[in-house]
Amino acid sequence: MEKTIDQICADALKEIETAKSKDSLNAVSLKYLSRKGIVTQFLRSISKLPPEERPKAGERANETKRLLEKAVEDAINSLDARSPAADSFIDVSLPGRSALPGSLHPITQITRQICDIFTRMGFDIAEGPEVESDYYNFEALNIPKYHPARDMQDTFYVSDNIVLRTHTSPIQVRVMEKRKPPLKVIAPGKVYRSDSDITHTPMFHQVEGLMVGENISFGNLKGILSNFVHLMFDEKTSLRFRPSFFPFTEPSAEVDILCVMCRGKGCRVCSHTGWLEVLGAGMVHPAVFENVGYDTSRITGFAFGMGVERITMLKYGIDDIRKFFENDFRFLRQF
Amino acid sequence: MKVSLSWLKDYVRIETDIHDLTSALTMAGLEVESIADPFDYLEKVVVGRIIEIKPHPNAGNLKICRVDAGDRILQVVCGAPNVKENLLAPLALPGTVLPDGSLLAECEIRGQTSEGMLCSERELELGEDGSGIMVLPGNLQAGCNIARAIGLSDYVLEIGLTPNRSDCLSVIGIAREIAAIQKFKIKYPDVRRPGKNKEIFDFTSVKIEAPEHCPRYAAALVADITVAPSPFWLRKRLISVGQRPINNIVDITNFIMLECGQPLHAFDFDLLAENRIVVRTATKGETFITLDRKERTLDPDMLMICDGKKPAAIAGVMGGLNSEIGSSTKRVLIESAYFNPLSIRKTSKKTGLSTEASYRFERGVDPGGTVKALVRAAGLVTEIGKGKSIKGIIDEYPLIQKTETIELSISATGRVLGTELDKSTIKSLLESIEFKVKNSGADTIKVTPPSFRVDIARPVDLMEEAARLYGYNRIPASLPLMQSETTQPLKTLALRENIKNIMTGLSFTETVNYSFICESSCDRLNLSSDDPKRRLLHVLNPLTEEQNVMRTSLVPGLLETMHRNLSQQTRNLNIFETGKMFLSKGNESLPEEIEMAAGLMTGGRYSQSWYENDADCDFYDIKGAVEGLLAGLNIDNVRFTKMPVELCSYTRYGYSAQIIAENKTIGIIGEVHPEVLGNFDLKQKAFIFELNCNTVLSLSGRDKTAGQLPKFPASTRDITIITDKNIEAMSVLEKINSIGEKLIENTHLFDIFEGASIPAGKRSVSIRITYRSSEKTLEDGEVNNIHKNITDRLTMEFGASLPV
């Protein structure tokens, strides 16, 4: 009896081996494994054996059945692999089952790029409160009450002495109060000004930078900012520094970059000047150092600040700043 | 600040091209924001010569003129009383846009064609006279453009001045900068020093009672004047920079202010009680009517210019109606003063009045230029007003404004700028803008800035002056050598960025909503009256009432974003935001700022696809996302427990949970309450979560140490029990884990079933338990025994039954 099943097995394997096509393999499968196939018949016949032989025979027969099934399947697969048949394929153009990732807000993406460039240059990142005291937002930055420079920033007030920060510059002061020079810090974050039109929103984002130590010069400020602009835009983007005024820096500068749209030829984006104003900067005013107790005879430093929305608009060609906060899914999904 | 090129040329030679000039000014710190021709609206207005006049056949008061327009003769219907043959007048051709905005076209007037329009001064905004057509000098050529013919064509530069440069709030100030840039000399207007004769004291006096508010006050008097329209050259100057001419006296004071930056005021001397000036602060509650005919209530901080009895002007801000120059004015007292900038700024802020005068005073006018401006004005008033000058001036100067001399180190200048400028270079740069420079040591110079540079106080100010005139762009860029300590990265920042990465990986898109929301959001969120989220921080001066408080939750912003997107037919949203919420501690202290992360899901789970039927997302979708987020943040053993009814004002009771880790509530999750959806005008279900990042940061998180991997195989057994529906499935798992059986490696819920074969109010809970020993391969019998024990414990503990 045992011999028979082994014989069946050997015959079947030989036939599988010699089969050259899928059809002939299916025929082998039908011959041995179908309901009326030889192996199946054999299994049915086990009930006629003496009870003590049945388990062993059954086990053996089942084993053979599994072995042959596997052999047929493998043979079909290897046939497929060698010579693809016209009727065996999937539609690879159907979309996959996995969910697509969401997108980061463009402001997040550009803030990260900015922060990455500066952290690679050795700057730490600091943050601070968004609701600030008048002291940190203005006084400590050399902007006393009733100073006309307060008109430069339309301020949201919570009370006479509490404001929504109008810039991330208060973080400068908070950092310098806690740490001794030398230091290199950037401060990203939300800021608030009561202004709203196609180029202004009452909330926007800034990145402020500060580098303080001995012998830090205006030339160094130019070096660091040139480096930044070249990495943020490209090597061909030239910079120009224009004298300007900020109460907390002296000398102060506005930094323009060659228009990234027209490369200086003049276009709508740069108001036909060929230049785009992207940064405010300068040497930290001695009055600010005095407020944090630094020795102004020894310590110098520079500070700079930029609007993230402005840079994002230039990088991504966005024409209306309000789009950032409308959060239209169709807008956000483009980034 | 507007300034015209032709006006500048009165004081400085300008030979460069206008574009080179403006770019040089910009690079010296005076940013030219625009260049315009103020009279470009006159492009299609030409000089017309009236060659023939005939009466209009259908209108008695109209005439038909044949007008020579140079290249052709036009027929123009005109009603002006002063039309005469051979008269030259401005002829506006069809296509002209008049200053009032109307577009001129060829038309028919009472049946007669009119091919243009003869204009009055007023129609062209060249003067006040609207009584008849403007009569032009007879030597002009018909057909010439009018702006060119009478010398109006000009460039007007709009300069964006920074608040420190009050010295440039005048044409002379800008001319001074141009002179320095071009290395030409500036030509100041001739002003004679006042003579010794003090006849003026016979007529009037000035008494300064508040010298700290008014350090200097000078006055001059002119009698027998005639108030009339200003001569054309004066009107032209004012109009070119956007000022409206009023009358000769007022125009002269404005002209001098624009020319040299010193605001002046002219009083009708005969309307001043006791014919004298008293400079004092107001008394509390005093009222006063300003020139704009508004009554102002004064307070004791405000400086007033008074006569013998009453206020006549708010000092430095606006004059009073009671002493206004009018057509019958015969004698004028001209004021030229130096007021304390802070005092003027306070008054301007308090009264809400900002004028050309207050703008200059609060930034600081030249305390050394008070008298010069006065004398020049008095001279012009005498000349143009055809008056008689009363000899002498009054110059009360109780608080002398000193200009400090500053010592500047040449080497320090080099260190700060990062480039070596030698002494003579610095000296000549500073001298070019009228600073006085003396050598004081090998490395130092002593610099005295001119009195008009009130912004110069420290050596760094001088460094900036030298640098800007030298050219910022000539300073070489260099990279600093500096060692500084590096600090640990900010934990809050790292967490926030991590959350953003994980959430986008989980298919959520980041939004950024405004930090301010509408006060009514609290009610719309159904917050109870004592909810801490009602601790609102109010903004005193919001742009709109929709943004009048700082947010105490990120949820309103997300719901509004959902609303905006639904209205754009975007129905399926997975969005999140990180940011601060603000809990007020009263308006006089900084609020508590809490970093939050929140998310919202609404609409379809998937967009309809080939492999999945359309289905709307539900609680378990957002829960899955939160579980994924927390797992990504290495936070283990998170429990979601049913939200107590009193804690879920904006989520639906029974469909929301608290998120708990290490016994701290780190957030909430759930379906938005249907009423709240209604309040936000939303018509489909939404699911939200909120996590408090500060609390998440306080968690210790998963300990990352490598453990041994198992050596022996595991055995799994399934168990299905039928429990009451209200028994939380996870409590069954927790029960199993609490038994403390050491061989249990893992428990996993793999099925929940209600219906058909299960009795009502019950459901089946199926759990797969993985058993494993670290010492041996477990035998079936051993596992079966343990599994049976556990099954028995569960059926007993939960009153559960086993499936049949």
Image (cartoon, rainbow, N blue to C red):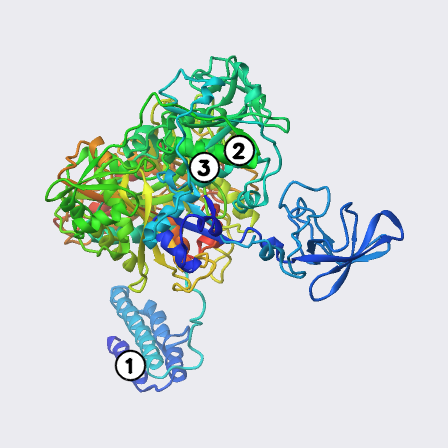
- Whole-number angstrom distance, CA of label 3 to CA of label 2: 48 Å
Q: Secondary structure at mark 2?
A: helix
Disc 1: CA contacts within 10 A as few (<14), some (14-19) or many (>=20): some
Determine contact: label 3, label 2, CB under 8 Å. no
Determine contact: label 2, label 1, CB under 8 Å. no
Residue A194 marker: 3
> Which residue is at the front of the view, A194 or A120?
A194
Chain assignment, label 2: B
Q: Is residue B271 above or below residue B450?
A: above
Residue B328 screen position, x and y as percent: 64, 26
Disc 2: CA contacts within 10 A as few (<14), some (14-19) or many (>=20): many
Task: Say which residue label 2 marks.
Answer: B382
Residue B188 screen position, x and y as percent: 39, 43
Q: Nearer the viewer, mark 3 or mark 2?
A: 2
- Whole-number angstrom distance, CA of label 3 to CA of label 1: 85 Å
Q: Quadrant of residue B641?
A: top left
Q: Are marks 2 and 1 on the same chain?
A: no
Residue B266 marker: none
Residue A13 marker: 1
- Whole-number angstrom distance, CA of label 2 to CA of label 1: 128 Å
Q: Secondary structure at mark 1?
A: helix
Determine contact: label 3, label 1, CB under 8 Å. no
Residue type at mark 3 is Ser
Chain assignment, label 3: A
